[in-house]
Amino acid sequence: MRAMIPSPRQRAADLGPTGKPPVRLGRDFVARHGETVFNAAHRLQGDAAHTPLTRAGFAQADELGRALRDLLGARPALTLWSSPTGRALQTLAVICEHLELDWHDARTDPRLVEIDMGSWGGRYYADVVDEFGPVMMPGGTLKPAPDGETYPQIAARVGGWLADTAQDPGDRLVIMHGISSRVMLGVMTGAPVDPVLGAAVAPGLPQGSVTLVEQGRATVPHRGTGFAPA
């Protein structure tokens, strides 16, 4: 079992293909973490390592755990995956209590982290908007920072993770982030490439939501109550 110690972050050029991944065995339950203190303060979170959940965020994780328990029952045969960020692992810990699974069995991968917002990361949305103009794009995506990560780079890294796990048997639960999960779901479902962003991007869902992907088709068994944009 892989230890829950993330390896150093690699750049997108090192992280595998950008094309459509191979057919995957099993099902993927791709969930978005709960609200954090950065979300509540309207700060750009990006790939920050640890921005703790708020009480609302823990409540969203609790609702997500109950929904998955209703769907899958106790001790389901799931491989647990998470972004190595604290907020994703906190969300997973609450879910594991509901599912009666051992949080320590989870695997982390730095390719599952959120978009790198470069020098905009950690700043208040309002301050960045005052200096650079609108940050939120149509559809709830984020404008890449001049020194940040692009959407094709996100597609490359999450595509690498998809390729590496495609032949793993059984179902997976994956705890991720708003933007990176949308890109990964876009890749998984063969969504069209956004002409502005340069990558496939699935529709946005609120924090605490989970998407089920099976044989390239996506459904939403639980829609969270969090704030929908990144």
Image (cartoon, rainbow, N blue to C red):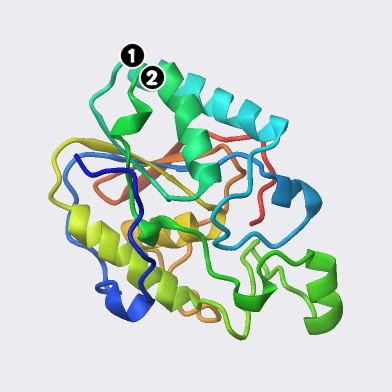
Residue drawn at point x = 58 percent, y = 84 percent = 147
The numbered mark at residue 74 is 1
Vertical relation: 164 (above or below) 101 = below
Residue drawn at point x = 33 percent, y = 59 percent = 7
Is residue 186 visible from the viewing direction of this image? yes
Three-letter amino acid code of the residue under disc 1? Ala
Vertical relation: 15 (above or below) 87 = below
Three-letter amino acid code of the residue under disc 2? Leu
Residue 21 horizontal/vertical position (percent): 23, 63
Mark 2 surroundings: few (<14), some (14-19) or many (≥20) residues within 10 A = many
Question: From the viewer's perspective, is 169 left or right of 225?
Answer: left
Q: Which residue is mark 2?
A: 99
Most foreground residue, 121 or 32: 121
Question: From the viewer's perspective, is 118 left or right of 104?
Answer: right
Question: From the viewer's perspective, is 34 left or right of 15?
Answer: right
**Quadrant of residue 134 in the image?**
bottom right
Mark 1 surroundings: few (<14), some (14-19) or many (≥20) residues within 10 A = some
